[in-house]
Each structure stands twice: as C-alpha cells, then as structure tokens.
Image: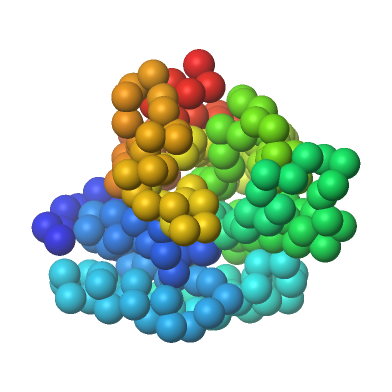
Amino acid sequence: MSLSTRFRGSTVLVTGAGSGLGRAIALAFAAEGASVAVAGRTAAPLDETVALIEQEGGTAAAFTADVSRADDVRALVRRTVERFGGLDVAVNNAAVLRGAGRPVGDLDPEDWRAMLDINVSGVLYALQAEIAHMRAHGGGAIVNVSSNLGAHLRVPGTGGYAAGKAAVSVLTRVAALDHIGDGVRINTVSPGASEAPMSLLPGETHEERAARLTTPLGRLTSAREVADAVLYLASPAAGSVVGTDLVVDGGAAA
C-alpha cells in the first residue's frame, strides 16, 4: 500500500467493511492516508480488514454495530469520533441480499423485512447520525452504496433487494438537497455485479459467475473500480457533485 496524501488527516467511516466492496473501500481510503473506522456486525472479519490496512502502513480501528439499530449507529459515530478525533467522510455500504431468485409473489416476509431494515433503514439511521456530527463540525462528505439493480435496472427474482436499493438512490438525492446547506455533501455509487462475495451464487465458481454476469464491457467490475468511484465522490475533486447516483457496472444498465 503506497500511501498518498489525498485523504491524509481525514477520518473515514465505512460500514459493511468486513469483506467485499466495504473492505476494498476501506483499504483504498487507508492507502490514501485516511484513518479508517471499519464497521460491521461481526468482529472477526473487521479485525482482518484492520490487519490488512495496518500491515501496509495504514491506520484503522474496528467497531461492531448493527446498522438496523439507530442506537448502534449513533454509538458507532460517537466511538469513531472518540478514537480519531472527528468524522470527515462516511461510506454507508452495509447491505444484505436475501431471497435471490424468488419472484415477488413468493418473497418471504422475513427476507423482505431484513432487506428493508438493513439496506434502507440502516442507511437512514447512518445518515442521521453522520449528518448530526458533520453539520455541527464544519461539514463532510457521505457516499451511500446502492446498486444498479433498482433505480437503473430490474432483474427477475430481485424484487426486495431492488426496491430497497431504489429507495437508497432516492433517499440520497433528497438528503443531498436537505443538507448541502449544512456543508454535508451526499452522493451515491451504484455498482453492478462486481468481484465481491455477494454476486456469487451458492456453490458458484468465479469463472461461472463471470460467464453468467456478462456486461457490454466484457468483464465484471473490480472491487477496486467501485472503491475508486467512492473515493472520487468523497474527494475535493467532486466538490460540486451533489446528489448524483454514479453507476459503475460496465454498461449493464446503460
């Protein structure tokens, strides 16, 4: 990890950072000099993310939290600020995919509730806790991770997940308008199928996934490409980008 200076001196919070896109995003921020708070429901994978950051010379700390609980998220922001002295950037990435392949008429109510609780309410609770700190301390940048499924693309058997991610896209845009006057700049990245565990079917190999999930680009998006999009939106280079939904999916939803 070659440390650069784009985010040096900044504190970044990443939810869902124990694996996949969240881990890639956390590693990318650390590589650019940020102190990174990595959050999720299970300690062991978060500790692995911290270890990967630290072995490359970066700074990170792990905090367990369930984003579907508003009290947990408020405590997460408080602990991040206590550990690192502030909060400059937040990436709300935590999400689950349940009931994949089931048509809407057969979607299990428990799967539906779980996706709404984590994928939608979890983003709302995180936004509220992050905004509360940022608007009282000079502003900041927030990037929500949505999906090309939902507002941009519909696929059979993904109704609950797509509905939740469409809600994240709209919530982000309204929040961006509500809080840019507070100095809080809010945007969304909407990845397509990427090289992350969530896109693998049970028992599927990486090669089988690549063959199933074709794109006009001719390959899957890498986790690092998604992370690069997040870092751009969080950076001063995107200072005039407010309420956008940046689709990173190799043209799948074009």
For the N terminus, the quadrant is bottom left
| Residue 94 to residue 155: above or below | below
Q: What residue sits 74% from the left and 71% below the top?
A: 69
| Residue 246 to residue 90: above or below | above
The front one of 153 and 170 is 153
| Residue 217 to residue 71: above or below | above
Q: What residue sits 44% from the left and 53% below the top?
A: 204
Residue 161 coordinates in the image, percent (x, y): 69, 45
Residue 208 coordinates in the image, percent (x, y): 38, 43
Q: What residue sits 27% from the left and 78% below the top?
A: 51
Q: What residue sits 70% from the left and 39% below the top?
A: 157
Q: Is residue 128 visible?
A: no
Q: Quadrant of residue 54?
A: bottom left
Asked if residue 200 lies left or right of residue 33, the reply is right
Asked if residue 102 lies left or right of residue 203, the reply is right
The front one of 75 and 95 is 95
Asked if residue 217 lies left or right of residue 14, the reply is left
Residue 103 coordinates in the image, percent (x, y): 78, 40
